[in-house]
Image (cartoon, helix red, strand yellow):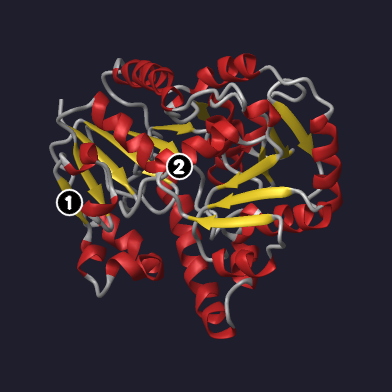
Amino acid sequence: MRVAIIHYWLVGMRGGEKVVESLCRMFPDADLFTHVYRPEAVSELIRSRRVQQSFIGSLPFPAKLYKNYLPLMPMALEQLDLRGYDLIISSESGPAKGIVPPPNSLHICYCHSPMRYVWNMYHDYRRSTGVMKRMLMMPAAHYVRSWDALSAQRVDHFVANSQTVAQRIARYYRRDAQVIPPPVAVDDFYIEAKAGGSETYLMAGELVAYKRPDLAVEAFNAMGRKLVVVGGGEMLTEIRRIAGPTVTVLGPQPFAELRRLYAECAALIFPGEEDFGIVPVEAMASGRPVLAYGRGGATETVVDGVTGLFFHEQTVAAIVDGVARLERMTIDPQAIRRLSERFATPVFERRMRAFIEASLSDVVPQRPRPPALVSVGA
């Protein structure tokens, strides 16, 4: 069986690329297709596979400007020749699923989220751009949105990384989805025996507007409590500007340092609404509780009152109140760690393999059939 894995772009190692790694382990002979590929930015496992770029990778400065080429990506995907592949797995968050599948292939889409910038977060992205870019964005997003909904019909089966994303798939694509949470390398993290006495909180992840890192910084400024911020992104300069004397902004950190910070922090602060949210699970794998905004994927990973607490308004006051409640909570690091193991990489690979095998057991994938053509005589 020939297998093709389609991923939107390979320019770093985040949650989507961890899914690609698991798929590469499951299908060692699979070929990878993507829009833009930076070998130095991905893992050795991904580099060991044959990777083919769409024509986006041949455009000027693709590693830097790839998001600006979004309107061309539907056309680029449709130029990929996938004849001869029996199983196609698309990893979707940017445009990836819109390939033209061969007639006798099975196409499974693992969806991290329908494209946020044209669907559920379109108006947030539009407001954050300048006037000229906003004018260009409106017709481009309209075109991409229409194509994206239509191309969902080229998928035989959807798999969503959370119930939150499954609901978006149903809303925007009118398709059902099986929920299989993404892999988390739980065994890479450890419990620090002295962490319970720490007074330093942690916020980790990409510093972008929808994750609301500004809320956490402003809350800890107001409390005069210690917060360490880890991560890069478009808001890094702003976060450094607004950070008070008790807030330390480290920027991007190597994995070994991030792992230590997880293990030694008092708790993780998670103020944004995520599709799934791997960061809270990594903190839980370190035996540390999570104070999370009570919407999105965090509600499917954090167990309220056991592995952490929720706050229900994205305000400074709500975070301040949440910290006070969290400090009155009894913490059991071993219990928190055990609950994180539900999301371990072997669990993902076992569930994904079972789903694919069940789908392949249908000799002919069931697709909607067009109405029969009717010939009308004179």
Q: Is 31 placed above or below 2 here?
A: below
Dot placed on the residue nearer the N-terminal end, 1 or 2 = 1
**Residue 342, image x, y percentages:** 52, 18
Q: Secondary structure at mark 2?
A: helix
The crowd level at tag 1 (other Cα within 10 Å; few <14, some 14-19, many 20+) is some
Q: Is residue 198 left or right of residue 42?
A: right
Residue 102 visible from this viewpoint: no
Closer to the camera in the image, 330 or 165: 330
**At which x and y percent is residue 154?**
37, 42
Residue, x 32% and y 46% (percent of image)?
7
Q: Residues within 10 Å of mark 2 (few under 14, many from 20)?
A: few
Q: Secondary structure at mark 1?
A: strand
Q: Is residue 174 above or below residue 131?
A: above
Which residue type carries mark 2?
Glu
Q: In the image, what residue type sits under mark 1? A: Gln
The residue depicted at 49 percent of the width and 58 percent of the height is 232
Checking the image for residue 257, the label placed there is 2
Kindly tell me whether residue 358 is visible in this rendering: yes
Q: Which residue is mark 1?
A: 52
Residue at position x 47%, y 27% in the image: 189
